[in-house]
Amino acid sequence: MLLANAVVGIIQLVIAIILAVIALYIGFSVLSRITKGIEEEKELAKGNAAVGIIVAAVFFAIALVVQSGVSGISLGVSKALSVGLFSMDGIVAIGVAILQLILGIVLAVGAIYLALSILDRLTKGVSEFEEIRKGNVAVALEMAGVIVATAVIIQSGVIGVTSALL
C-alpha cells in the first residue's frame, strides 16, 4: 500500500510539473498579446525592470491558479483510486479535475486581460504599456498588483469549483 501511494504521488507530481510548464508557456505567450507591442524578451535582455516585474507577476498569477488546479487533480486522483482508477467514475473524476484546471487557466488569463484593460481605461492620463516600455517601475508595480490580486480572486473560484465538482 505504501508503494502504491508513493507511485500515485509521483504520478501527481509529474502531472503537476507538466501542467505548470504548459501553463507558464501559455501565460508568457498570452502576455505578449496583452502588452500591446512590447517585445518582452528584447526588453528583458536590455534590463528593463518594469517588463521583468510584469512577467514575474504573470508567472506568479498563473502559478497561483495552477496550484489550486493541481490540488483539484490530486482530489480527482484520490477519488478515482477510491472508486477504481479505470472505472467510469474514476475516469470522470480525473477528467473533471483536468478540465477544471484548464478552465482555471483560461479564466485567469482572461481575467488578467480584462483587469489590465479596465485599469488602462481608468487611468486615462497614463499609458501603462508605454510607461512599461520606458521602464517605469512604479507603473509596473501598479499593474503587477492588479495581476496578482486578480489571480488570488480567480484562485478562490477554482478552489470553489473543485469543491463543488469533486
Image (cartoon, rainbow, N blue to C red):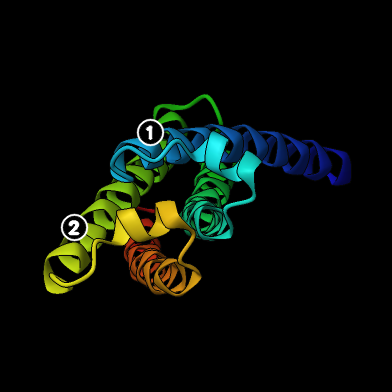
Does residue 161 appear anywhere in the picture? no
Location of residue 54 in the rendering, given as x and y in whole percent from the top left corner:
48, 57
Task: Give the residue drawn at x 32%, y 54%.
Answer: 130
Location of residue 165 in the rendering, given as x and y in whole percent from the top left corner:
32, 53
Q: Amino acid at mark 2?
A: Ser
Q: CA distance from mark 1 to mark 2?
A: 37 Å
In the displayed structure image, the side of residue 107 where residue 11 appears, left or right: right
From the image, tell me which residue sits under label 1. 92
Task: Give the residue drawn at x 60%, y 35%.
Answer: 21
Q: Tag 1, which secondary structure?
A: helix
Task: Give the residue drawn at x 33%, y 63%.
Answer: 154
Q: How many marks?
A: 2
Q: Nearer the viewer, residue 132 or 111?
A: 132
Q: Nearer the viewer, residue 89 or 18?
A: 18
**Are circles 1 and 2 on residues that touch, CB within 8 Å?**
no
Q: Quadrant of residue 145?
A: bottom left
Location of residue 40 in the rendering, given as x and y in whole percent from the top left corner:
49, 40
In the displayed structure image, the side of residue 83 where residue 165 appears, left or right: left
In the displayed structure image, the side of residue 32 where residue 111 appears, left or right: left
Q: Tag 2, which secondary structure?
A: helix
Location of residue 163 in the rendering, given as x and y in whole percent from the top left corner:
38, 63
Q: Earlier in the sequence, mark 1 or mark 2?
A: 1
From the image, tell me which residue sits under label 2. 117
Task: Give the residue drawn at x 52%, y 51%.
Answer: 55
Could you classify mark 2 by the number of other residues whose Cα lies within 10 Å: few (under 14), some (14-19), or many (20 or more)? Answer: few
Q: Amino acid at mark 1?
A: Val
Quadrant the N terminus occupies? top right
Q: Residue furthest top?
A: 86
Q: Quadrant of residue 138?
A: bottom left
